[in-house]
Image (cartoon, helix red, strand yellow):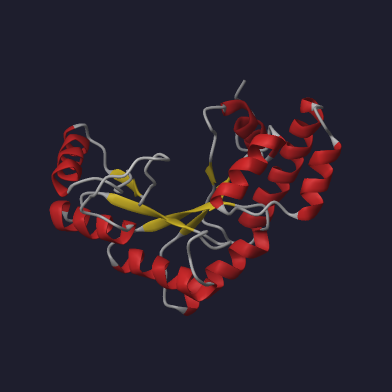
Amino acid sequence: MSCIGSSKEEIRQILEDYRAHGISRIVALRGDLPSGMYRDGDFRYAEELVKFIRAETGNHFHIEVAAYPEIHPQAPSYDAEVKYFKRKIEAGANAAITQYFYNADAYFYFSECCQRQGIEAPIVPGIMPITNYNQLARFSDRCGADIPRWMRKRLEAFGDDSEAIRAFGIEVVTKLCQKLLEGGAPGLHFYTMNRAEPTLTVCRHLGWASNLS
């Protein structure tokens, strides 16, 4: 659920619909209006949306918010990023899902910084399987997710060899997942982008889905 450009009445109606359909988990995001569009709303930040959900529905919903181990593109500093995240947790969020990343150390460092600030909510790392380098590069440049230089060079070297890119992507993402879990991550959140097979393949390599075809 994103709140940018929405009124309280619109969000209230959505919450009522969710409850009526038995939905009990929400990912609360600020979101972005489509390019070229502008609309005033009652919410500026996800923190405000979380507070509103809690005020309207109490503890009915398990609320997850976004976290940015490599810093949101609009955050002025790393310390500010942690501060903004803490506000969302204090507003009533139960847990967080991070923007995707390929540097496990960035996640661990962010988690340590949050712990030093007294943040105890689970921070689940976001995982993006790699299937198309050009699309990934464009998306990463827009959202501020870093593709390590060594990865960029390897992916660029594959050119249009989609099978080689896919195989390399499975290897890299599987190792990333293993390192995160071994380091204490509470779980993994996959951004499937409506393509299940790359995620299922990673899960098989992790030993989670050996019975899936």
Q: Could you say where residue 48 lies in the image, as x and y percent from the top left?
A: 26, 60
The residue lying toward the viewer, choosing from 73 and 55, is 73
User: Relative to 153, is 139 on the left or the right?
Assistant: left
Q: Is residue 12 above or below residue 90?
A: above
Mark yes or no: residue 167 visible. Answer: yes
**Residue at the spot 67% in from the left edge and 43% down from the top edge:** 137
The residue lying toward the viewer, choosing from 122 and 129, is 129
User: Relative to 20, is 194 on the left or the right?
Assistant: right
- Looking at the rendered image, the quarter that the N terminus falls into is top left
**Residue at the spot 61% in from the left edge and 34% down from the top edge:** 199
**Residue at the spot 74% in from the left edge and 54% down from the top edge:** 148
User: Relative to 19, is 104 on the left or the right?
Assistant: right
The residue lying toward the viewer, choosing from 106 and 144, is 144
User: Relative to 38, is 144 on the left or the right?
Assistant: right
Q: Residue furthest front?
A: 36
- Looking at the rendered image, the quarter that the C terminus falls into is top right
Residue 149: quarter of image: bottom right
Q: Could you say where residue 143 lies in the image, as x and y percent from the top left?
A: 54, 50
Mark yes or no: residue 128 visible. Answer: no
Q: Could you say where residue 4 lies in the image, as x and y percent from the top left?
A: 31, 48
How many numbered marks are there? 0
Q: Is residue 193 above or below residue 56?
A: above
